[in-house]
């Protein structure tokens, strides 16, 4: 193998260096926008009871499944209501029993007086009194039955309140907000927990007025989520036409093709193609810096090294799109620190 020594400041060997050819291509011009992952479907979970919150086993950001407990209201007041309803039920049952006994006695008296009346032993007036008493007792039985039904319904309602003490999640979602704390009062109709549905996930960005025309419904978008270190494919689904009067910005929404592992509230970057441009591609390994200037070393036909300042446009895989080159140049990869402009390479 041929070896060449470094002379003076350095005379580099062609065999000690790696080369690549700068390629001229038409590339996509991309622009990134800050995006937020969100769920368009939110559920505000409240209690049907009034009472102090006994426990809240979930925290903001927790993923919960349908049926999982979110919080519990202290059931002390419910037990008091249940005891009252149970007492009313027992009283109604006792009242019905007494009414039925009284009706049975009145019916016996009526039948006895009827027999006596038919035999002429009692007057018609006394017989009619017995019949009236039996009818009254019968109505009292009917009233007692109605009161018993009401008491049973009240007892069942009181029992049903117990299940409302433990409030469970109505959906598979993520806890996005807790509006109450343990020991605070929960009121019917006032939400304690806000959930976001994880089955319907979207993203949205706030776009400057000057960039709105770059977006079209259905255009593809690449959304990168740093927390997951993953890129997702999406499309522009909504461009809200009403802008903010103060910031002169507009909201653009994206629909994912697949949103696996995404959760509402995650930070993301939406990358869109806003045009095309001719550029020269070189490997990232060709970049170097001399005196604070970013550039590359190229080799001409006479094996003379030239330092060319370049401007980076974008990164495309392992390559960098740059301006400052024409394309077709032979660039040096991993240029050594002692390589200088004008140096001749020895074969």
Image: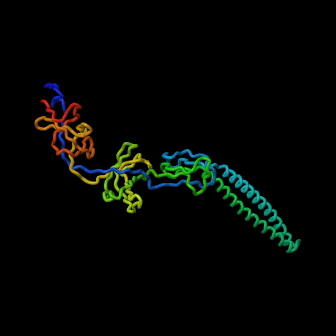
Q: Residue at x 19, y 33 (%)?
A: 340
Question: Which quadrant holds residue 113?
Answer: bottom right
Question: Which quadrant holds residue 12?
Answer: top left
Total label count? 0
Q: Is residue 19 above or below residue 132?
A: above
Task: Give whichever of 336, 343 is nearer the camera.
Answer: 343
Measuring from the top left, give residue 17's x and y in whole percent.
19, 32
Question: Which quadrant holds residue 294?
Answer: top left
Measuring from the top left, give residue 221's x and y in whole percent.
33, 52
User: 61 left or right of 25?
Assistant: right
Q: How is the image coloured?
A: rainbow
Task: Give whichever of 86, 169 is nearer the camera.
Answer: 169
Task: Give whichever of 161, 281 is nearer the camera.
Answer: 281
Measuring from the top left, give residue 219's x and y in whole percent.
31, 56
Measuring from the top left, give residue 29's x and y in whole percent.
27, 51
State the residue lying farthest toward the right.
121
State the residue lying farthest toward the front.
291
Q: Residue at x 67, y 51 (%)?
A: 77
């Amino acid at each position: 193998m041929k070896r060449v020594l470094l002379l003076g400041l350095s005379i580099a060997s062609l065999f000690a260096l790696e080369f690549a050819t700068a390629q001229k291509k038409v590339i996509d011009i991309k622009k990134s926008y800050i995006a937020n992952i969100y769920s368009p479907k939110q559920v505000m979970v409240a209690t049907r009871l009034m009472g102090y919150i006994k426990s809240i086993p979930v925290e903001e950001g927790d993923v919960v499944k349908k049926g999982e407990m979110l919080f519990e209201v202290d059931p002390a007041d419910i037990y008091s209501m249940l005891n009252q309803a149970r007492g009313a039920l027992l009283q109604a049952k006792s009242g019905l029993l007494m009414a039925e006994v009284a009706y049975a006695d009145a019916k016996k008296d009526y039948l006895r007086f009827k027999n006596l009346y038919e035999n002429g032993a009692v007057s018609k007036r006394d017989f009619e009194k017995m019949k009236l008493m039996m009818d009254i007792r019968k109505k009292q039985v009917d009233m007692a039955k109605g009161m018993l039904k009401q008491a049973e319904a009240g007892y069942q309602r009181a029992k049903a309140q117990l299940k409302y003490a433990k409030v469970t999640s109505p959906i598979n979602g993520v806890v996005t907000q807790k509006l109450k704390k343990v020991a605070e009062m929960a009121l019917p109709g006032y939400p304690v927990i806000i959930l976001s549905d994880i089955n319907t996930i979207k993203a949205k960005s706030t776009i400057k007025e000057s960039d709105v025309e770059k977006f079209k419904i259905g255009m593809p978008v690449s959304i990168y989520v740093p927390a997951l270190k993953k890129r997702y494919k999406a499309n522009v689904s909504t461009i809200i036409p009403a802008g903010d009067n103060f910031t002169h910005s507009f909201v653009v929404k994206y629909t994912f093709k697949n949103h696996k592992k995404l959760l509402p509230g995650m930070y993301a970057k939406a990358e869109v193609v806003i045009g095309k441009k001719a550029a020269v591609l070189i490997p990232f390994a060709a970049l170097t810096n001399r005196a604070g200037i970013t550039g590359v070393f190229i080799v001409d036909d006479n094996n003379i090294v030239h330092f060319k300042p370049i401007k980076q446009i974008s990164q495309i895989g392992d390559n960098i799109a740059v301006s400052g080159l024409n394309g077709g140049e032979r660039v040096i990869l991993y240029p050594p620190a002692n390589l200088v402009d004008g140096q001749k390479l020895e074969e």
